[in-house]
Image (cartoon, grey):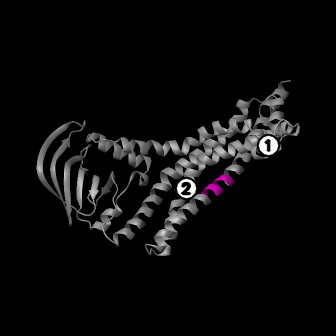
Amino acid sequence: MAINISIRKFPRPKILDRYIVKEVMSFVALAVAALTIMLIMQTLFELMDMLINKKVAWPYIVKLLAYRLPAFLVVTFPISLLASSELAIGRLSTDGEITAMRAGGISLRRIMIPFLIAAFAISILAFIINDYIVPEANHISQNIIREIVLKKGPPNIRRNVFFRDAENRYFYINRLDEKNMIMQDIMVYEMTREKFPRTITAKSGKWVVDTWKLENGTIYNYDEEGKITYEMSFETLDIIVKEDLQKFFQNQRTPQEMSSKELRQQIDILQQAGADTKNFEVDFYMKYSIPFSGLIFVLLGVPLGLLYTPFYYQIIWSRGNVNPHLGCLAI
């Protein structure tokens, strides 16, 4: 009896796990391919506008499309897990395999385990792509767009964007008037040998060639414990920016162009300066929530797949309980 229990407990579930995981992965591959093609088609319409109306060379279009593919994959993985788990469990249920498993003493909770294993593996893959590949791909893609825009005039800079220069200084602009090059809510972090950076804040400023002319601001120095040791207010302050405009904007990084570690560092710096970091924190947590949302989708997809039992409805319709026309629409 001990031998029979051992055979029942270990080899059979392992074979079952591999079988269900393989079933889920096959549907995931199909769903990812289909959804990625849809996103590519949608993006092509946007890029065609750049190609036709803005006269952008086609090599730029091909590069932009290629660098957006990693982000497409991260988005499609969770949705694919929802669809694939629903389709896989529905197929197993339709073919009577779920009934056979239940008859063999395997509970629904045990059947859920291979679905969760597949979802966890894909979620880890999605997180790695989202945290290591997508930021660099987005950064290169945005630099291509900035290069195209810079050829035609001032760049279109969004709010809440970081810059970094060759002197290891970080620049943060909340809002920039591109036409007049007027900045609002500025922060500059000068990395020193101390644990905390020297911080300069200003209400407004103007970008004049290679100089930032800051107005109505404060300079802060911190000790090893993060306490303010020096504070000085100023009406005007000039900061020399040695790089030219194009190189400077190439170092620009939005939260979508940062890894979770880089974004966490920027949030810590802003919090030390007393800045509002809610928008950045939302972007930070989304770097985890989007890849791992597939686990939640699987928990939703499997019960939904079990509820969909075509043969049961076909039996009802064959007995005349449901109008045949309505039955065809329901399928």
Residue 141, quarter of the rendered image: bottom left
Residue 32 located within the stretch drawn in magenta = yes
Q: Residue at x 19, y 55 (%)?
A: 205
Q: Position of residue 316 (x, y in %)?
A: 84, 36
Q: Position of residue 130 (x, y in %)?
A: 51, 51
Q: Position of residue 120 (x, y in %)?
A: 61, 41
What amino acid type is highlighted by mark number 2? Phe
Image: magenta residue range: 30-36
Q: Position of residue 20 (x, y in %)?
A: 74, 42
Q: Which residue is mark 1?
A: 327
What amino acid type is highlighted by mark number 1? Gly
Residue 204 located within the stretch drawn in magenta = no
Q: Does residue 52 show up? A: yes
Kindly report the secondary structure that dominates the magenta region of the rendered protein: helix
Q: Residue at x 36, y 41 (%)?
A: 278
| Mark before the other along the chain sequence, 2 or 1 | 2
Q: Which residue is mark 2?
A: 72
